[in-house]
Image (spheres, coloured by chain):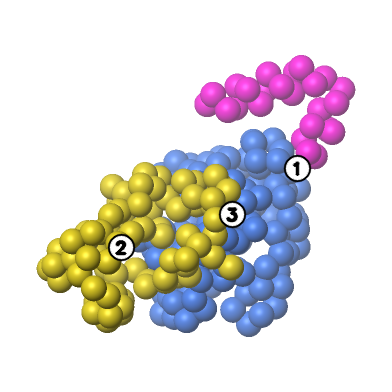
Chain colours: A blue, B yellow
Amino acid sequence: MKNQLLAIALLIFCGSFTTTFAQTPGLEIGNKASEISLPDLNGKEIALSSLKGKLVLIDFWATWCSPCVEEQTELARLYRKFKNAGFSDGKGFEIYGVSLDAKKNNWENFVKTKKINWIQVSDLKFWKSPVAKTYNIQELPYNILIDGNGIILAKNLHGRDLEKAIAGYLVK
Amino acid sequence: MQAIVKGSVDIGPVMMAENLNVLKQQLSKLPKNAEIVVYCGCCPFSACPNIRPAMALLKEMQFTNYKLLNLPQNVKVDWIDKGYPMSE
């Protein structure tokens, strides 16, 4: 709530520069999410920007993080529920899972065993991943919800709060 | 996992028996008074599932000079982000 108020205050303050402000890459709500382009399990690079037009949850996680592992079941449910839904700013919901694992085996086994069917990418660099630095990740799990234009809508929502936030962007 | 702190050895999450065995083997090569510093690679102290098994093993093997590195939040925030030396 505090962040939203701040964003609104800044938007008003920026006046005619609103568009410029919204396109600024950054970590705050209203900023453009920085590009991520990392390989999936088959080594194919997938860019976050390729998901333009969809509501996207960037999920930072790792198999060594137990709360992250627990949350994957909930994410699977949200993915089933929303993946084909229409949103005010695009069609469809996607999860862009960024694993901070270091060992491909752990990551691959988990994804296959749990039948995770959304996008999964990793540079297998653990906490040393440049993405962890770019997004200033301080703990896992951590996530960011972005709109069809890559603008940050919400940060680090989980459980019911996350579901409510996604549902809030459904076409009425 | 991979080692973060320069000079450290990656043992892996010792909450898993196989990794605890790796630690046991490493420790068996060392004298009981060797200076050993343990750190957790994943989580805040309060939530780390690996520290306790490691410390318990050190005690059980009767090491006398072991310490826990103070990384209250995690190795990212309290080591990497502070620019401390990292392994290659």
Relative to A128, say whether B27 is above or below.
Answer: below
Q: Name the residue under label 3.
A: A132
Query: Dot 2 surroundings within 10 Å: few (below 14), some, or many (20 or more)?
Result: some
Can you see residue B65? yes
Instruction: Work out how far the residue at label 1 is from the one at label 2, CA to CA, in angstroms.
Output: 43 Å
Q: Mark 2 points at which residue?
A: B36
Viewer-nearest residue: A1 or A165: A1
Residue occupying image coordinates x 13% and y 67% = B62
Residue type highlighted by circle 2: Ile
Query: Dot 3 surroundings within 10 Å: few (below 14), some, or many (20 or more)?
Result: some
Viewer-nearest residue: A34 or B8: B8
Q: Do the residues labelled 2 and 3 touch (CB within 8 Å)?
A: no
Residue type highlighted by circle 3: Ala
Residue occupying image coordinates x 54% and y 65% = B87
> Who comes first in sequence, dot 1 or dot 3?
1
Q: Position of residue A24 (x, y in %)?
A: 78, 38
Answer with left or right where residue A97 lies relative to residue B15.
right
| Magenta-highlighted residues | A1-24
